[in-house]
Image: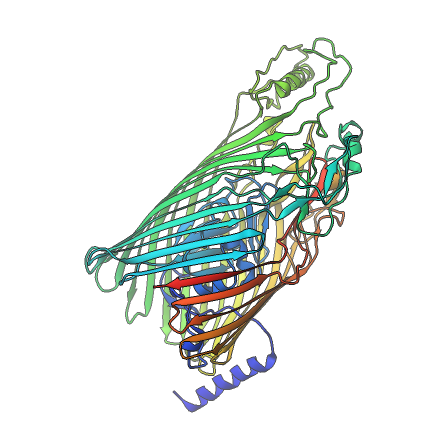
Amino acid sequence: MRPNTLLIRQVFAASLVSSGIAVAQDAAPASETAQPHSGTQTNEIQEVVVTAQKRSERDIDVPLSITAASGAQLVALGIDGPADLSKITPAFTYRPSAWGNPVYTIRGVGFFEESYGISPDVTVYVDQVPLPFSAETEGAGFDVERVEVLKGPQGTLFGQNATGGAINFIANKPTATLKAGIEGGYGNYDWTKAYGYVSGPITDTLKARFAFEHDGRGTWQRTYTRINSAGFAVPDTSNPMRLGHQDISKARLLADWQANDAVDFELNLNGWADLSDDQALQYLGFAPITPGAGADTRFKPQLTSYPIAPDNATYAAWDPTHSLRRNDHFYQSSLTGNAKLGDDVTLTSITAYSHFTASQPVDDDGTQYTNLYDVNAGKLASITEELRLAGTIGRPRLKWMIGGNYEHDRTYDHQTFDFHQGGSNDVFNAPPIPGLIGGGMSYYYTGGIQHVDQRVNTGGIFGSLDYNPIDTVTLYASSRYTLTYRHASACLNDNGDGTFSRAFSVVANLAELIKTGTIADNHIPPGGCFTESATTGVPLTTVERDLNEHNVSWRLGGDWKPVPEWMLYANVTKGFKSGTFANITLVTDSQETPVPQESVTTYEVGFKAEGLNRSVVASGALFHMDYQNKQLAGAVLTPPFGYLPTIISIPNSTVDGAELDLTLRLFSALTLQGGVSYLDSKVTSHVFQPDVHYGSPNPIDLHGQAFPGTSKWQGTFDADYGVRMTDQWNGFLGTDLYFQTQARSHFSRPNLDVVPGYGLLNLRAGFERNDGGYRVEFWGHNVTNKFYLLTVHNIQDTIVRSVGMPVTYGVTVTARF
């Protein structure tokens, strides 16, 4: 190495240290066991190997913004799945939708929608096998070797629906020798964890690994009200009602078969079941979504006087006559095969089948009344196939890849809603209308079922080239053509008791009278569809719609490495998210209008650097994103129900941002990591939307508003210190911090949907054997018991909020053999 090159690297690293910026992302390489703190006798930060470009490479050689963390780090930080990744990934956020479906956002790009069968903006993978829908991702972080969070559009190699980014978990693989491990934990609220695995060879060419985990918890939520003899809620924290049971089981079987020197296969069978209680919401106020319906709301006096929930995460309110126990199941099988076709070419096939079913009850109103109670039932089934060839030419001066993929999805979203004595029920208490069935009677109804079933076929072809004109420069290009056919079948149905069909028979007859001048005699049967034709007013049996789309995503860029430990890169990327049909309250068939595909063009420049013999690792990026037809949550007037949620398309919007990450190993026992991100998102078109939230029909212009769920600043920090206790035992201490600034839950004028900024502090301490065989860790999450919000909703007649967990603490004991 030239002396002046070494001097330049050391001066650059020293400047990073002196800056004092606590940012990080490059984690220790993944391994099956946590590396003992005293086992490393140097200050060198171990290299990260990633598969972001579908080949194994050092992180510093990949011209993308990546967060990578080992499985040991994920366990130490209490990261169980994608929802917890904000602890290590600035510019990543998670929030639950009103009906519990997870929403993942990277760099302000996410898709907030309650339906199960809606494609996300951030797609999750396990070993490059897609989990096409966010509801399927709960078990993705189970028994993993590492995780890679890829920021920015990833459509050329990972397909559409990754405009925000992609998350790839790498599962722990079968071992060449027999190994096993167990782990148990106990914490407050009777939290328990039981985990175990066994791994090793079955024959000379076949290895397998089986892992299982169960997470349980007692109740942690309690009600703060009771209903008095007059039927009104009054404060009462002594009410014995409790909620919050957790019951989640996960399992995976991996089998690796080395058929011969050139061919290998990996079979992955995995699944999970969630039988936990749905989290109850907190009541903030009364706000009917049907303009002028406040006087007709049967529970208006009770709701307007309902006690506001205190700023305490453990307090909430729910209807005790309904169960909130979910029943969600997922299983997946995949087969990955690799065949070496010579020294420089590899053929890879990834085939998978995924199946998800859900029955998730939600008490939407945050009170003890049945103002609105939903059971969201869904089924998702997907078949995916990817076939690709990859190779190198000349030293390798040129790296190439070409392939194709196919995906077939069947999605079923059925929402059964129960609003006994809810806000919109009395709209049919009208004077008699001659000729209409039962005109003038009270048409009180108890609920209904809205559903949309979709069948989606997606095909694509893709390719990439990486070329080194000289040793220090790489130029790259990639592209993918995608064709999607989507068919939807939807309707709004009576729930079977006939009250909804009776009321809407009158509505249908009135609509037909207005449109045709003919007095009709429509009788919608109990359980029947009462979505009407917008043209004739006649009730339909179903609404059928099609959406055909195609697009070309692409990526162009280059990087320069003046020395092997430095990289400067720049790229331009075009990505797409598919269009869709929303699961909305479908009164007329004209409402079932598809939302077209969105597209984004991202411009990014960044750097990656190592210094002082890898005791300092840093990366950073600046980016600008131009969006067309961004899909975001909005509202639509749906008589007689008022303004209800739907998906809207924003013609033009932008996101500008910056990220900086740093890892320091000041000496062998102390590692500091941290990261910070800045985002400025805004709608640049003039789009007028009803101020649906909180009952105001007055339209507002969205121009200049930030994307919902997006904070301007986010940051993470982690410190880990290890000390030798005896010849065989080491001790360790650690702390991590996450913060984000204020965000908004929705587009609206009032300040009631603001999610205030907050910071969360976690602590850990313990001891372990030098060889990693035994480990005891004491931990605390949110140790300051910070009260913080995840999101705010206006559902039916009430404003409610979802809050984060209070302080939790416990101990985890691990043994590996």
Corner quadrant of residue 87 = bottom right
Q: Residue at x 53, y 68 (%)?
A: 605
Residue 158 in view, yes or no: no
Outermost residue toward the bottom? Answer: 3
587 left or right, relative to 204? right
670 left or right, relative to 145? right
Identify which residue, 397 or 748, lies in the foreground: 748
Q: Residue at x 59, y 50 (%)?
A: 95
Compared to 50, does 285 lie above or below?
A: above
Corner quadrant of residue 596 = top right
Residue 391 in view, yes or no: yes
Residue 221: % across, % down: 63, 47
Residue 202: % across, % down: 23, 55
Q: Residue at x 54, y 84 (%)?
A: 14
37 left or right, relative to 102? left
Residue 287: % across, % down: 75, 38
